[in-house]
Amino acid sequence: MKVAFVASEGVPFSKTGGLADVVGALPKALAVLGHEVEVILPRYRVTAAGPAVPHAQSLTLPLGIGFKFATAQDGGRAHQVQTFLIDCPEYFDRDGLYQQNGADFPDNAHRFAAFSMATLEFLKRQTAPPDIIHCHDWETALVPIYLRNLYVGDKFFGATSVVLTIHNMGYQGIFPPHFLPQIGLHAGLFTIDGLEYYGNINLLKGGIIFSDFITTVSRKYAEEIQTPEFGYGLEGVVRAHSARLRGILNGVDYEEWDPATDKLLAAHYSPADLKGKAACKKALLQKMGVAAPAPARPVIGIISRFASQKGFDLIAAIAEQLAALDAYIVVLGSGEQKFEDLFREMALKHPDKVLVKIAYDNALAHLIEAGSDMFLMPSRYEPCGLNQIYSLKYGAVPVVRATGGLDDTIEPFDGKAGTGFKFDEYSPQALLGAIQAALEAYKAGKAWRSLMLNGMKKDFSWAASARAYSQIYETLRKTKAQTAQQA
């Protein structure tokens, strides 16, 4: 089938989080299955310009705030996947992807409306329509909204189905109602059965309603977003459309994340030969400024965006108890100021044990995975999570809260079977108890080695996820064909 991936970010062109990793990896796995896959992304300031696509010059976008113009650029072809970049400098030639100085761009609705409409106009310039348009999160939820409203009579897209993947329900694209005509949509959509949401418009809600199928990034998260705790006000909408909802666990790209081949490590290792992990641990501690590393002391790694969603309020509540443990705590990330300040203060008070870098550093992230004995992810909610899967491969035993993809991927250790440690109650005491249980198990060297190997032998490659998506695509294509025959 011909599949067009449409997303607001994707490696190696742009990235703020796990969405970009998915968009960089899943299309490659789908291409292996024989699909013709293209990826369409905005061209941001951080994205190098490509050559113009001749047949797609000057895409005219009739938005309510006046005509806007975009062009399509060739982003290159790799792993049998073609990438195109939508260039609209007025909206995307900026330092940040979504924010500046920690605040969302006030015209984000206009920006991603322009991108969504430009995507559809660009697809119309191609010789054949896509069988599937696969959209991601609220930033591209306007694609199905436009397709089923502005383009409803367009025969070019008559056999095209739309899949919307929700990576994080906490971000929905909520804007004041006066934005509706500004993004080219009629007032009739401002209803409870349309985009209306407590007096505002909600683009993710519209994407859910107008898509042909909805997925999210783990089985558990598909269940959780149907509840008030995790639905963020859309749980009723999701439940109403649950017959076409499925949770498919994200995979990981083992070409990039494998300690046996990782070029960013001080030494390589594998389940057959773990010697290199000790060398990575020593290299990590030295890089973080420890003059005389204690090899017997366990390393607890943290790599994350610093936000309450990620459980950092729990860590703040037990900061001194953590620092008192006989362990190194190595932290990499950035985010909310209060948590950046927390880790800076912990590092100042405990410079020999709490080792912190406030930044995004891909090379250091790889070294933390390899050099850590444990990896901490106490998230309030976690749609899928990737770092716990990387950690399994690298022999860094995950300590996680049993939510979303963390619950789906980590099996509790019982002394022999299992791959990590989980806690259910979202409380500082439950988190501390799980960490203490992991430290006790670490002291039992032989059992710990078995625990590491259990995780390192797990396979979370993209192949299984790609097959699941392929099955959805095929079902949608058959449904469209049957509907056309009946008509």
Image: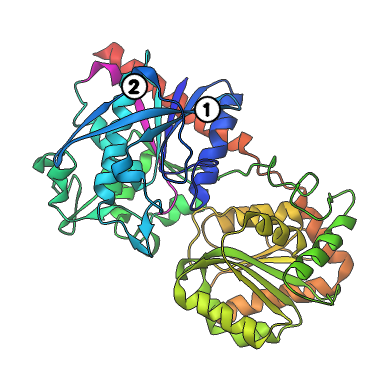
* Residue 10 on the magenta span: no
Q: Is residue 156 magenta?
A: yes
Q: Position of residue 455 (x, y in %)?
A: 74, 54
User: Which is more N-terminal, label 2 or label 1?
Assistant: 2
Query: In the image, is residue 51 above or below residue 261?
Result: above
**Disc 2 designates what residue?**
56
Q: Is residue 42 above or below residue 412?
A: above
Query: Tags 1 and 2 in contact by the CB under 8 Å rule?
Result: no
Q: Secondary structure at mark 2?
A: helix
The magenta segment is 154-168
**Identity of the residue furthest to the left in this view:** 187
Q: Position of residue 137 (x, y in %)?
A: 38, 46
In percent of width and height, residue 218 lies at 52, 49
| Colour theme | rainbow
Provide residue 290's location: percent of width, then percent of height: 77, 75
Q: Quadrant of residue 67?
A: top left
Q: Residue at x 36, y 22 (%)?
A: 479
Mark 1 nearby-residue class (10 Å; few <14, some 14–19, many ≥20) = few
Q: Is residue 376 left or right of residue 292?
A: left
Residue type at numbered disc 1: Gly
Q: Residue 76 — which label?
A: 1
Decide: few, some or many residues near mark 2? Use Cα within 10 Å; few <14, some 14-19, many ≥20. Answer: some
For label 1, the SS is strand
387 left or right of 278? left
Q: Nearer the viewer, residue 454 or 14?
A: 14
